[in-house]
Image (cartoon, grey):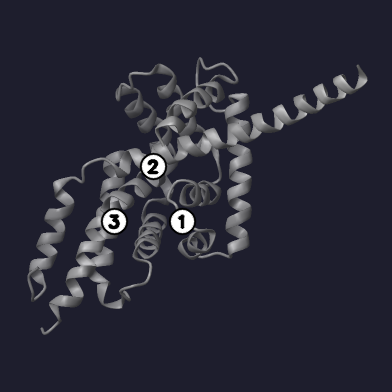
């Protein structure tokens, strides 16, 4: 009986540790997703235009 | 006049490949997407102009992030917070995500991030989202590795408790809602990853 209870408690403690870890992990996943969302957007043509123009100012082409 | 094309080309290729990452980092710094793109373009051009001083084979991503960060702090420091909190919430709410809990999670995470001290926020973003090692993040931010480590861990704890208690300025959201939404969402996402 007593054995049963203490292992029950232990399970509870490790469950709350798991929970805390899970929460941190969840935030981490979310954070990466927020960042990747922008990374995965198509690059606006403007960026490449600017670079192309700058490249033309340089003596050589690509 | 006579610069070898062969040294410039790989530089340009790599720089172009980094544009999406520069945009993402800029977005986390200024919030407002069009201001962020201006910042990313400025940083891209700064990097381009400084290409002679870049050593191919070294970490160009860290180098360009450092340029972008310096640019941001020299120009836009004053106004970022307001822009981030107002504009971005509005913006994000318009981007209708099909899953309402996902939208809540995104809004609250951004608001939560906005409440962190800037140096903690950027450390967390570089390491937690940008995929940089602590050493690289330290180089980008111009501080010691130990400083980055402690900023990241403080940021994690603070963000967790902000989300847990719903301590951000946001009407209507009950305490704990954001955390629940993030958890629900992460479960879905982790199966994708």
Residue A35 circle label? 2
Above or below for A12 versus B115: above
CA separation, marks 2 and 1? 13 Å
x 76%, y 26%: residue: A11
Q: Earlier in the sequence, mark 1 or mark 3?
A: 3
Q: Which residue is mark 1?
A: B132
Residue A62: where, in percent of width, then height? 9, 68
Between B125 and B38, the residue placed more toward the observer is B125
Residue A18: where, in percent of width, then height? 66, 32
Specify the farthest residue to the bottom: B2
Both marks 2 and 1 on one chain: no
Q: Give the side of residue A21 with respect to residue B64, left or right.
A: right
Host chain of mark 2: A
Specify the farthest residue to the right: A2
- Secondary element at tag 1: loop
Host chain of mark 1: B
Q: Give the side of residue B139 with respect to residue B71, left or right.
A: right
Within 10 Å of disc 1 (Cα), the crowding (few <14, some 14-19, many 20+) is: some
Both marks 1 and 3 on one chain: yes
Between A50 and B152, the residue placed more toward the observer is B152
Host chain of mark 3: B
Residue B132: where, in percent of width, then height? 46, 56
Label 1 near label 2: C-beta < 8 Å?
no
């Amino acid at each position: 009986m007593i054995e049963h209870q203490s292992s029950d408690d232990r399970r509870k403690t490790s469950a709350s540790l798991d929970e805390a870890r899970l929460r941190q992990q969840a935030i981490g996943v979310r954070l990466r997703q927020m960042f990747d969302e922008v990374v995965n957007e198509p690059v606006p043509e403007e960026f490449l235009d600017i670079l192309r123009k700058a490249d033309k100012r340089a003596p050589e082409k690509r | 006049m006579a610069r070898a094309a062969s040294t410039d080309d790989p530089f340009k290729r790599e720089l172009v490949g980094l544009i999406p990452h520069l945009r993402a980092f800029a977005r986390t710094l200024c919030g407002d997407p069009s201001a962020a793109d201006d910042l990313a373009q400025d940083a891209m051009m700064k990097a381009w102009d400084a290409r002679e001083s870049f050593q191919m084979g070294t970490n160009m991503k860290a180098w360009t992030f450092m340029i972008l960060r310096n640019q941001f702090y020299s120009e836009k420091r004053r106004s970022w917070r307001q822009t981030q909190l107002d504009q971005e919430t509005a913006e994000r709410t318009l981007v209708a995500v099909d899953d309402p809990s996902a939208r809540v999670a995104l809004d609250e995470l951004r608001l939560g991030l906005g409440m962190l001290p800037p140096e903690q926020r950027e450390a967390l973003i570089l390491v937690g989202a940008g995929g940089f090692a602590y050493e690289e993040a330290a180089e980008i931010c111009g501080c010691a590795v130990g400083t980055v480590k402690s900023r990241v861990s403080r940021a994690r704890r603070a963000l967790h408790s902000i989300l847990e208690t719903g301590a951000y300025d946001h009407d209507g959201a009950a305490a704990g809602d954001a955390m629940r939404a993030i958890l629900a969402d992460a479960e879905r996402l982790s199966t994708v990853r």
